Amino acid sequence: MNITVKNGYSIFIDYTIGVMEKTCKICAKPLKGRTDKIFCSAHCKNQYHKYVRYASKTAAIEINGYLKRNYAILWELLGTNKTQVKVYRNILEKKKFRFKYHTHFHINSSNKTFFYVYDLAWMEFSDDEILIVRKR
């Protein structure tokens, strides 16, 4: 399309440059209507959100299983009457303890990090010893 501007110059405007046809996230049909539209129908929108809920629920169930397992291992080693115990790292590894999974952590005044699984915590020493403590 040619447009003549006030000072006599012609400008050619091509409206097709940069315009990409958007498609539905689920079925890849071309979208019509609003420019910020993501899904072609309510069905596709529901399918997408159903999948997202399922994926997040599955991940949460898996992680909660790891946390329960870690808690059971720490509780078994600590016992019911003790408040703290020192064990070697390989004992926890043999029981398939996952050091990556914990609920929170705390750094004490001497700059040591305690990793918690609910109310039980462990702290790693440099000589492959691990201190397991019960939160008071």
Image: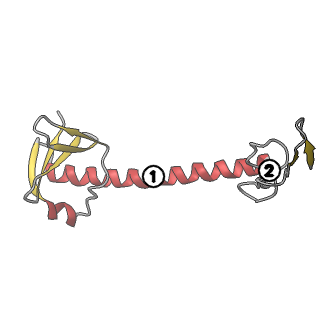
Q: Is residue 128 above or below residue 111?
A: below
Q: Quadrant of the C terminus?
A: top left
Residue 91 in percent (x, y) is at 15, 63
Q: Which residue is mark 1?
A: 61
Nearer to the camera, 14 or 47? 14
Question: Which disc number belongs to residue 96?
Answer: none
Query: Dot 2 lies on which element?
Result: loop
For this orientation, the residue located farthest to the bottom is: 94
Residue 38's spot in the image, x, y percent? 73, 47
Q: Secondary structure at mark 1?
A: helix
Circle nearer the viewer, 1 or 2:
2
What residue do we see at 88% from left, 37% from top?
A: 7
**Residue 4, percent across and down?**
92, 42
Of the two numbered discs 1 and 2 on the same chain, state the one appearing first in sequence.
2
Q: What is the CA distance from the residue labelled 1 to the residue labelled 2?
A: 32 Å
Snapshot quadrant of residue 33: top right
Q: Which residue is found at the position 32% from the left and 43% from the top? A: 103
- Specify the amino acid type for callout 2: Cys
Q: Nearer the viewer, residue 18 or 57?
A: 18
Report x, y in % for residue 133.
Answer: 14, 43
Residue extending furthest toward the front: 7
Would you call the spot at circle 2 few (<14 residues within 10 Å), some (14-19), or many (20 or more)?
Answer: some
96 w.r.t. 63: above or below: below
Residue 40 image label: 2
Q: Please tell me how crowded label 1 is: few (under 14), some (14-19), or many (20+) other residues with Cα within 10 Å.
A: few
Q: Residue at x 59, y 50 (%)?
A: 52
Q: Nearer the viewer, residue 8 or 13?
A: 8
Residue positioned 71% across, 55% down in the render: 25
